[in-house]
Amino acid sequence: MNIDTTTSSGFRALVFCALMGLMAALPWSQTAQAADFNPQPDPPGFGMLGVADGQTARLNVRLDRIPDQIYPPDPYRVTLYFLNGDGRVLTQQTFPMIAGQSAFLDYAAPSIPVGLRQRIRPIVIVEPDVRGNTPDFRSAVEVIDNITQRTAFVYPGRHNPPDDTPPAEHNPPGFYDSGIIGIARGQAARLNVVNTADIHNPDGYPPDPYRVTLSFYTKAGVLLAQTTKLLAPGQAAALDVKAANFAPSQGSRLELYAVVSVVPDAHGIVPCVMPTVEGFDIANGKTVFLVPAV
């Protein structure tokens, strides 16, 4: 179980996606491994997020209805996963689905001390039919309070690059930043980044980890915190900043932005990394907002 033991935070992030190719197999754990197939051509739509004691994450997916399209008689195989920050499967389930149907997978946070958080990464994989066609789908993650059953926040899935951008032309620079966000005393900001090459592995992708730097800056451009990590496919890194460490008074807010930079490989290829920024309450570890990569 991969549980965060700190309650600091961070963000200024977006998406980096290199050439998309065939997927061989997901290099997770010995006990959970996906079958060999070519998944949807877009990069995965989710980065990392956190759940605390008393919360459940629900991954929802719905296959689109396409008018006048003839679907095969057999249902599509749709597999939903939750992974931890080391790329290991926490839970998974496969559903046979036809166009217009929906399914969901729940992951309840383990019984952990108040204030600590479990890092999770949602994944949706829809297998193509016998003709090689994959239906469009919509996905989102809800974080639900177990007692009240109220949704704390929703993290909508994304498809990047845009549908009109051929994957072979989408090899962006390895540097992105967020807009300005604010946190108050008692809160922290967390910048998450995960190397998603375990899902979308371009042809000839090198096996070596990628060097990723995560940074937080004040709105004036003063560096608050920074860390550099080597991320193998499926691995995630995080950087935290506490408002109390920088805000001068009880009523003040810390306004900041986050930056993610990735060093390309020797061939100039940047991996597809998914960043997210969370704001969470330090006392209970529960996320109060999440900014996905855009």
Image: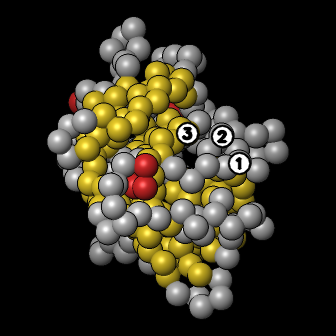
Depth check: give the residue in front, 16 or 263: 263
Most distant residue in the bottom direction: 148
CA–CA distance in space, label 1 to label 3: 11 Å
If you read the primary sequence from the N terminus, does the residue marked by circle 1 or circle 3 appear first?
1
Quadrant of the rendered structure where residue 15 is?
top left
The image's mark for residue 18 is none
Mark 3 nearby-residue class (10 Å; few <14, some 14–19, many ≥20): many
The image's mark for residue 2 is 1
- Which secondary structure lies at badge 2? loop
CA–CA distance in space, label 2 to label 3: 6 Å
- Which secondary structure lies at badge 3? strand
Q: Nearer the viewer, mark 2 or mark 1?
A: 1
Provide residue 203's location: percent of width, then percent of height: 46, 22
If you read the primary sequence from the N terminus, does the residue marked by circle 2 or circle 3 appear first?
2
Q: Is residue 210 above or below residue 175?
A: above
Mark 3 lies on residue: 236
Most distant residue in the top direction: 266
Callout 2 touching callout 3 (CB < 8 Å): yes
Identify which residue is drawn at 40% across, 36% down.
225
Most distant residue in the right direction: 31
Q: Is residue 283 above or below residue 204?
A: below
Is residue 29 visible in the rendered image? The answer is yes
Callout 1 touching callout 3 (CB < 8 Å): no
Provide residue 248's location: percent of width, then percent of height: 33, 55
Identify residue type, mark 1: Asn
